Image: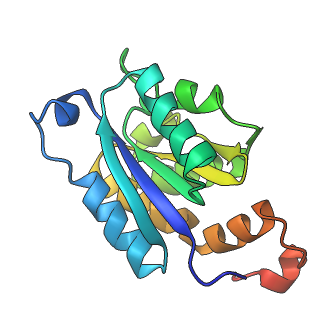
């Protein structure tokens, strides 16, 4: 398997995009991913707007060939939360187990986890994952799925080893 994959982090926040709130989730995700041997190639903040989210995701997946794209924010039930809809509209394949694993682990800590709508999937050879917007929830959710991301990317890019040969659990 490849030792280091590229990744990019998109913060989805109306207030953050206007400079009215400091983004703490994006930098936290950067630390976690760097510690897990990912190379952070890009970070950006956009408002809660489907077209803005789609534009960044498609640029990173189609032109920049980023291996892992994570978003933070816009996954709840507020009227402006549209990250899952934007993501769904551009995926080639959805990977429901990633969202299910994050929600299951979060539910052990808070009942509000049932309100999270983040999804994950593949566009071309990029893995796109929606994380919650709070720094704590983003960190905890990424911790749940980090152990499987290297293998997921290996398989997405055509790796031929069986899953059992690469299992880390």
Q: Quadrant of residue 88?
A: top right
- Looking at the picture, does residue 107 appear above or below residue 158? above
Work out whether 97 lies above or below 75: below
Q: Which quarter of the rendering shows the N terminus? A: bottom right
In x, y percent, where is residue 126? 65, 53
Examine the rendering and report whether any part of residue 108 can be seen.
no
Which is nearer the eye, 167 or 154?
Answer: 154
Q: Is residue 123 left or right of residue 11?
A: right
The extreme front residue here reads 63
Tell me if residue 78 comes above or below residue 125 in the rendering. above
Describe residue 76's horizontal placement relative to residue 130 as left or right.
Answer: left
Q: Nearer the viewer, residue 113 or 153?
A: 153
Residue 64, percent from left and from top: 55, 52
Q: Quadrant of the C terminus?
A: bottom right
Where's residue 17, x and y in %? 22, 33
At which x and y percent is residue 46? 32, 33
């Amino acid at each position: 398997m490849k030792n280091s994959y590229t990744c990019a982090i998109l913060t989805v926040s109306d207030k953050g995009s206007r400079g009215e709130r400091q983004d703490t989730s994006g930098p936290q995700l950067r630390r976690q991913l760097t510690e897990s041997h990912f190379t952070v190639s890009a970070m950006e903040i956009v408002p809660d707007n489907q077209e803005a989210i789609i534009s960044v995701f498609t640029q990173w997946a189609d032109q920049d060939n980023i291996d892992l794209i994570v978003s933070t924010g816009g996954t709840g039930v507020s009227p402006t939360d549209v990250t899952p809809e934007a993501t769904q509209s551009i995926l080639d394949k959805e990977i429901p187990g990633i969202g299910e694993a994050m929600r299951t682990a979060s539910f052990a800590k808070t009942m509000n986890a049932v309100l999270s709508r983040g999804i994950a999937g593949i566009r071309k050879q990029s893995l796109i994952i929606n994380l919650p917007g709070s720094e704590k929830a983003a960190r905890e959710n990424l911790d749940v799925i980090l152990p499987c991301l290297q293998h997921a990317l290996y398989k997405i890019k055509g790796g031929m080893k069986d899953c059992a040969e690469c299992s880390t659990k």
